[in-house]
Image (cartoon, helix red, strand yellow):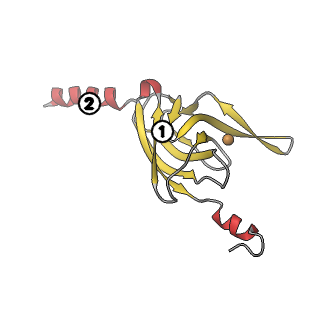
Amino acid sequence: MKILGFVLGLLITQYCRAELLLEAGFIQALLPGQNTSAAFFTVTNRGETDCDLLDARGDFAGRTEFHSHQHRDGMVHMRAESSLPVPSRGQLVLEPGGYHLMLFDIDSLPATDSMVELDLDFGDCGNYRLQLPVRDRFQSDLADKKPAGVP
Ligand SMILES: [Cu+2]
């Protein structure tokens, strides 16, 4: 029994080394006349191996980029990153104002609250599929700025 437990323990450590937990955030609904959006989500690495998010794809987008926000000279700049780190026993958080996934050349997105799928490539740490809801984050902003006379 003891030996079996030891062997099982070894197997579990082996397969759980890069155990990633994905948590959906949202994908930004398209603004009128735009074909670019941003996606946000969290990856928790419960394993012993450092991982990197190398690529992300969605059928609905022609091209994607990882971006970070840099504060420089009192201004915020977006910088393209070739990959994003998911440290062992740590988290990668994509959130507004921080890391995010930019999606370009989008023909259309499903209606607000519908789900879209992203395929995430973590290299040796595996491939994962994530479902994200479409959210209209700027809806209230737009309502405030709506010109008079527009319903
Ligand atoms: Cu960006």
Residue that carries the numbered disc 1 in the rendered image = 59
* Labels 1 and 2: the sequence-earlier one: 2
Q: Please provide percent x and percent y for residue 9.
A: 26, 30
Look at label 1 and name its amino acid.
Asp
The residue at the point 53 percent across, 28 percent down is: 54
Give, as a three-letter code, the residue at label 2.
Answer: Gly
In depth, the one of 33 and 57 nearer the eye is: 33
What residue is pinned by disc 2?
Answer: 9
Q: Residue 136's quadrant in the figure? A: bottom right
Residue sitting farthest toward the top: 124
Q: Residue at x 45, y 36 (%)?
A: 119
Q: Is residue 123 left or right of residue 80?
A: left
Q: Is 80 on the left or on the right of 62, as rendered?
A: right
In the image, residue 112 lies at what x, y percent?
52, 59
Q: Residues within 10 Å of mark 2 (few under 14, many from 20)?
A: few
Q: Considering depth in this image, is 117 or 69 the residue closer to the camera?
A: 117
Residue closest to the eye, 4 or 36: 36
